[in-house]
Amino acid sequence: MKTHVKEKPFSCPDCGKRFINESYIQIHQRIHTGEKPFLCSQCGRGFHTASSLKLHEMQHSGERPFACAVCGKTFRINSYLTAHYQTHIKDRPFVCGVCGKGYSRKGLLMIHERVHTGEKPFPCTFCEKRFASQGELRLHRRTHTGERPYHCSICLKSFSRHWHLKTHLEAMHCEVVAGFSRKKFPCSDCEKSCNSAAELRDHQRTHTGERPFQCSFCDKRFALSGTLVRHERLHTGITPYHCSDCGKTFAQQWTLTTHMRTHTGEKPYSCTQCSKSFVAPGELRHRLTHTGERPYHCSVCDRSFNQSGRLREHEKIHFGEKFDCPECDKSFTRASSLKNHFRLHTGDLGNKSNWSFSSSHDRHTSNHRTLVHIAAFLKHHN
């Protein structure tokens, strides 16, 4: 240990990490201060060092200068190529004492052994999750930051992982990308064919009902990891997608895309029956006003509706909470309807936005304060 301390005489005052050169400490301390002076000219992302920026810019340019002499695979970083070469080496002298799996490098064995020990030394700074390797942490952080560093050069769609981009190219652009051929993965339970094994696996969960991804905050489970990520943002409040025009933030990319159209005025979804156009595809339910179609049917009575939201409102008559009038025996399915009705008893209440009513299931608690308020109002105006 004394040898290492002697070789690295400069220590970080924040975490104690040691360095051989004082200038390295200044660079390292940017991790603690959050300083990122090197900015990408294409996307504006900041970096602690110039070398990190250079590597990032290769993701935009597609430059991968380090090629494997065995299989031709290319890499942005020489160390990635060095690690890749190990896949061609049959000699794996570093063997796991628990399961017998072999590795070409000791570092890879150490990461693997954490599967057995449960050690997760790399914590996420955004949530409470921990990871066994820095690579796993780096991929996880993108679920918080919204970073999508892998860009399709054909349609400009972006992805958080390299294999997501590869799958996209195989599925959507195989005709124009050399080396790709469209391979279909048929589902054994239905007639659907998928573009990748991963897509097929996700699809088959619609048949099996499997939901392997559980929320860290509640009991909900999901079939897709992406759905889990979006759901957990409801708990964390993280909104990684920022509007560059007004600064408003959103939890999902598509919500930001739709919002941006309020600035650009773009309305790409047009009604085929009239001249109206809309910012989101969901608004094409407008066409039902022309066709008279009412596809949403009540399971209790024979009423039908042209919008799912209107069906949900209607079903409250059968199943939903009731908002009870404290002055008479009438009840309502919506708080707004109760507010309108209550004016028949009291007259104009002035600033109606201050009034709130609780549903019948909790009227013995929070609704008590409202009743006292109403009683005082009536006494004062009688």
Image: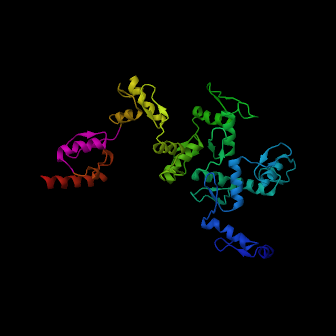
Residue 364 seen in this snapshot: no
| Depth check, front residue: 332 or 158 | 158
**Residue 258 or 307: which is nearer the viewer?**
258
The structure's colour scheme is: rainbow
The spot of residue 370 in percent (x, y) is 26, 53
Q: Is residue 380 left or right of residue 195?
A: left
Left or right for 336, reference 216: left
Residue appearing at x 26%, y 40% in the figure: 331
Residue sitting at the far left: 382
Residue 321 in sight from this viewpoint: yes
Name the spot of residue 118 as percent of width and height, x first: 67, 56
How many numbered marks does the figure carry?
A: 0
What residue occupies the far right of the structure in this picture? 91
Q: Please tell me whether residue 32 belongs to the stretch shown in magenta.
A: no
Q: Is residue 43 above or below residue 329?
A: below
Q: Quadrant of the N terminus?
A: bottom right
Measuring from the top left, give residue 150's x and y in whole percent.
66, 46
Tell me where residue 342 sits by quadrant.
top left
| Residue 339: in magenta span | yes
Q: Position of residue 63 (x, y in %)?
A: 74, 48
Which residue is at a point 59% across and 33% down the rendered structure image? 208
Residue 308 vertical placement versus 323 (above, below): above
What are the residue bounds of the magenta stretch? 320-349
| 315 in relation to 117, above or below | above
